Image (cartoon, rainbow, N blue to C red):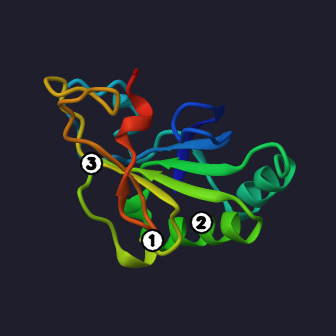
Amino acid sequence: MRYHDFQVVLQEVPGEISLCYSITGCRLRCDGCHSPFLWKLSNGTPLTKKLFAQTVYRYKGFASCVIFMGGEWHGEKLLKLLKIAKREGYKTCLYTGEENVDTMLLEQLDFIKTGKWDPTLGGLDSPQTNQRFIEVETNRNLNHLFTKN
């Protein structure tokens, strides 16, 4: 599993300071994708368990959530990283264009964003979006947190 970049982000999970990894190898290739460089599996840097553990340890007490932008196609590897994050006390989130992900992954997630990008429908801040931001435990749709009042 490889990642293109790592960022500390504030908007992807409302109310959380999140460590965000953009995983390479996306097969969806959505029209209008803002990150087509993520399509190629060989792009980026290997995301090893050791590197990931060092990062979550370094940000512990500052950040509260870990987000993977993709990576569900690396099921077992992603599962191991999610378990590390949970063990260190982080909330976890997956942004995927898929509608469903493996149950074992879902069990390690606090939040999931589903739905392929459709430029005619917009993202989570659009009332017409096909995407959903879900609190996994309650299955509650939290899209309203992304729209302006």
Q: Alpha-carbon neighbours of circle 1 within 10 Å: few (<14), some, or many (≥20)?
A: some
- Residue receiving disc 2: 82
Q: Earlier in the sequence, mark 2 or mark 3?
A: 3
- 81 vs 71, left or right, is right
- Residue 3, how many percent across, how many down? 55, 44
- 67 vs 137, left or right, is right
- 27 vs 85, left or right, is left
Residue at left 52%, top 50%? 68
As drawn, the label of residue 77 is none
Q: Quadrant of the C terminus?
A: top left
Residue at left 77%, top 65%? 88
Q: Return the residue nearer the eye: 37 or 120.
A: 120
Q: Earlier in the sequence, mark 2 or mark 1?
A: 2
Mark 2–mark 1 Cα distance, whole angstroms, equals: 8 Å
Residue at left 44%, top 36%? 145
**Quarter assignment of residue 136:** bottom left
Q: Are marks 2 and 1 in contact (CB under 8 Å)?
A: yes
Q: Are marks 1 and 3 in contact (CB under 8 Å)?
A: no
Q: Residue furthest left?
A: 120
Q: Earlier in the sequence, mark 1 or mark 3?
A: 3
Q: Secondary structure at mark 2?
A: helix
Q: Return the residue nearer the eye: 25 or 22.
A: 22
Q: Please identify, in this view, whether the residue under mark 1 or under mark 3 is nearer the observer.
A: 1
Amino acid bearing label 3 = Arg
- Residue receiving disc 1: 105
- Residue 144, how many percent across, how many down? 37, 37
Q: With respect to residue 16, does 94 lie above or below?
A: below
Amino acid bearing label 1 = Leu
- Residue receiving disc 3: 27
Q: Are marks 2 and 3 in contact (CB under 8 Å)?
A: no
**Quarter assignment of residue 19:** top right
- Residue 18, how many percent across, how many down? 65, 42
